[in-house]
Image (cartoon, rainbow, N blue to C red):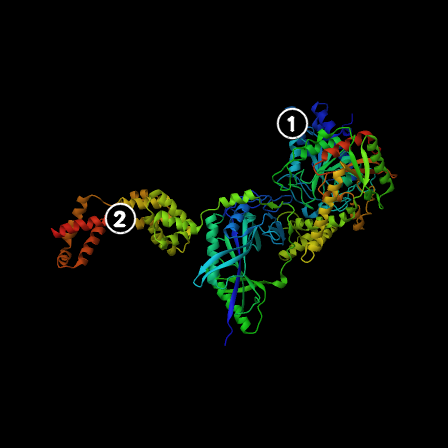
Amino acid sequence: MDILDLTAVELAAKIKEKEVSVLDAVEAVIKQIEEKEEKLHCYVTIDKEGARKRAEEVQKAIDAGTLTGPLAGVPVAIKDNMCTKDMLTTCSSKILGNFIPTYSAEAVIKLEEAGAVIIGKTNMDEFAMGSTTETSAFGVTKNPWNEEHVPGGSSGGSAAAVAADECFFSLGSDTGGSIRQPASFCGVVGMKPTYGTVSRYGLIAYGSSLDQIGPLAKDVTDCATILEVISSYDVKDSTSVERKDTDFTKALVNDVTGMKIGIPKDYFKEGLDPDVKEAVLAAANLLKEKGAIVEEFDLSLVEYAIPTYYTIAAAEASSNLERFDGVKYGYRTEDYEGLHHMYKKTRSEGFGEEVKRRIMLGSFVLSSGYYDAYYLKALKVKALIKKAFDEAFAKYDVILGPVAPTTAPKLGSSLAEPIKMYLGDIYTISVNLAGLPGISVPCGLDKAGLPIGLQLIGNTFEEKKLIQTAFTYEQARGKFEKKEGK
Amino acid sequence: MAKQYETVIGLEVHVELATKTKIFCGCSTEFGGAPNTHTCPVCTGMPGSLPVLNKQVVEYAIAVGLATNCSITRYCKFDRKNYFYPDNPQNYQISQLYLPICRNGGVEIETETGKKVVGIHEIHMEEDAGKLIHDEWENCSLVDYNRSGVPLIEIVSEPDMRSAEEVIAYLEKLRLIIQYLGASDCKLQEGSMRADVNLSVREVGAKEFGTRTEMKNLNSFKAIARAIEGEKNRQIDLLNEGKKVIQETRRWDDTKETSYAMRSKEDAQDYRYFPDPDLVPVRISDEWLEEIKANQPEFRTEKMLRYKEEYDIPDYDIDIITNSKHLADIFEATVAICNQPKKVSNWLMVETMRLLKEHEMEPEDIVFSPENLAKLILLVENKAINSTVAKEVFEVVFDKDIDPEAYVEEKGLKTVNDQGALRKTIEYIVEANQQSVEDYHNGKQKAMGFLVGQTMKAMQGKADPAMVNRILKEILES
């Protein structure tokens, strides 16, 4: 048995049955990291010694019977925009290059309470701004399926680490598709829950009204299990929602009989790669064969989603990132004369191009005289998009479409044309604008052998319908072939 | 003939609310802790931290709004005001711009020129900033975030005031309302109440307002009055010289009694206000509003009526005592113990006021407890000490809130009620002052006073003057 072939839930079961020790699992992951990391660069920080020490503690608790959860002893990777106590947390930015928090994000605490073992912090687009993980200040991450391609982003390190078996699962964050798109590009399952389901406390904010933490995992079962562990009502996060239906694993049911699935025609128009289109429609057919009712419908507002998203997210980001000023923590420029020079120089040197672009965009749309025309208008469109989804969910249980218009692009081909890169978010961002849950499940390979993702979108608080549909599809699809020699 | 000008004044008053914890985190609001000891990730702007609204802040803000006749915004929001400064750890201040909690109110003031209503444009909630400490020796600045996140309300008046007298009357009225609510102690010197003065002048009869300036750094009512006088004259002088008033923010220097420009409108910042996405809108239900209304305390007018009925003390006393919530509280608590309203009132009106004036203190600064004042009153009542000794003891009570019973005991200040001992002393005094005895018999009343004084001196003040008088008379007449 190769430990690395196990899913997170399978591994935890083996550990519970004492067939595998926690340290065995940690050592297997460390060995894989030692082999793969130099090429792939999934991590910003790897804490081998910390993980080994923690493995022993967790093992003791499991042996003592105090840790019995479904993730006890499983090695996990955390996206580097979630605070981890006493462990470097950089957001892949020079400006936080030396930042060690004194507290952990609530989602991280939930995982630790469940006995997961943190291996390290994964690479990402700087401050989660980007779709390729190429905007990281600490180097690019490569796609484990083909190292000439990007892993997607912004949770590219988290997706690649799962795909390359450098961890058993990971946490990512999704503001406009940052979990689902890299999951799609790396052939893993990624889920963004309903806004408010996972506490944002300790998640370093990009677009506060859109950010949600979620899992990236090997299959739907792992995904549902992880989400059940990390979701919580947290009084430290005012936007946290108290819900009693977070027993997501109950929805791991292989049945879609009578499930109404809507396919937005607007998601299959020009710009969609033919291979992607074919694979996604084939997945829809498979669900139809399993008893689902599949129909097409209009969701034309989607064309306004991109300008709306980049207005709101950039506006919030421009304010959220003001605290990085060289005064209290993080990077401070060396030579400066006076306060304002220190601010300017620190931020000019500390932030990368894409972050600066969005700060400028956000500052512009919030400035006096433009606020009504841009920011307020974007909020109105956001409300209309939510309304369009409400109408769709009056008819359908689940909406089905692609995650991204293409498979993973080649390294270095995206950043030169930021607008084109932004357009790649077309299918994912309206889900964030409407606060909905969405899941990405691998559904095939393109001609070049790169993974394609199927996106399922649910109504707010209806993750269970998503999980059930995704699980049924996954069972019907069969094993998703991993890349040779992996 | 010289032109006649009218002064137009509006105020922005910041009040620190008396909550135990900060507006968006659980840190203590206590004043005076060692630097950065009342802090956490939220109030120091650490990455990933999130604000959670303190409900008590909303309740205090609504209570002040109700007491100043405002309408309450039932669906209100917080907005971010973005500006970079090291005392502001997030580089944005969480405040309210678009939907402030209270709007369109007003309070009635009374001055020598009569009664008038000063309108309140709005009241909004916001967080205070930290404090910068500039270290001249090390050539660096240090920041203390203990005050960061302390809750404030900002009360913005309409430009309805026309003189320093009206401004002071308005501020005193606001202060009294807020103190009665227990929402703040409103101490200008300590910064728990801060007023910025917006002032312009215009020719009498003009319809348009003149260009206004905003004056900051006003730490006492006296400073406010002086600043208004100074700024009014500065603007009138400019206009009389044919110059223009520039719209700007000025800083008052009270020791030099002059102001200087801090920044003009031209370099006014764009604060890029937008609703804070980390906080959910505040919805104020009918039930909540009713609950706050039901919990409003007795205000001054009601209290004055009750005092008249319940305690039967002079109107003059009632006016002074109810003019400070703290003084009124002390009065009521002391009466509750010793049941002597007139005596309590006298101690507050005479000795307390005298000492406050002497020490340049406000009634809010009083530290003595009702228990110790009541004890002192009872000591006099039971003739354990005479009134001269009582005044001395009160000074110590006023200073240090000591227990007067223990103090009198310890210092041996009790009146000597042993008639035999007193009679012996008086006989000795009479013996030693035969000239005075003769003067007395010759009808010189002053001699009697001299002999009483000598006796009190010999008794070290610890005699009951009435008893001294009686015995002395007996001896002299015998």
Q: Residues within 10 Å of mark 2 (few under 14, many from 20)?
A: many
The spot of residue A59 in percent (x, y) is 66, 27
Q: Residues within 10 Å of mark 1 (few under 14, many from 20)?
A: some
B340 horizontally vs A78: left or right: left
- Residue A67, labelled with which disc? 1
Please tell me whether mark 2 sits on a helix, a strand or a loop: loop
The spot of residue B431 in percent (x, y) is 14, 52
> Residue placed farthest to the left in the image?
B478
Identified at 61% across, 63% down, the residue is B265
Identified at 32% across, 42% down, the residue is B406
Residue A418 seen:
yes
Is A255 drawn above or below residue A207 in the view shown?
A: above
Q: Are marks 2 and 1 on the same chain?
A: no
Of residue B14 and residue A46, the one placed in the foreground of this image is B14
Discs 2/1, front: 2
The spot of residue A2 in percent (x, y) is 78, 27
**Mark 2 is on which residue type?**
Asn
A317 horizontally vs A406: left or right: left
Chain letter for mark 1: A
A191 horizontally vs B365: left or right: right
Of residue B22 and residue A130, the one placed in the foreground of this image is B22
Quarter residue A25 falls in: top right
Of residue A364 and residue A463, the one placed in the foreground of this image is A463
B406 horizontally vs B170: left or right: left
Please tell me whether mark 1 sits on a helix, a strand or a loop: loop
- Residue B386, labelled with which disc? 2
Identified at 36% across, 45% down, the residue is B334
**Mark 1 is on which residue type?**
Leu
> Residue placed farthest to the right in the image?
A447
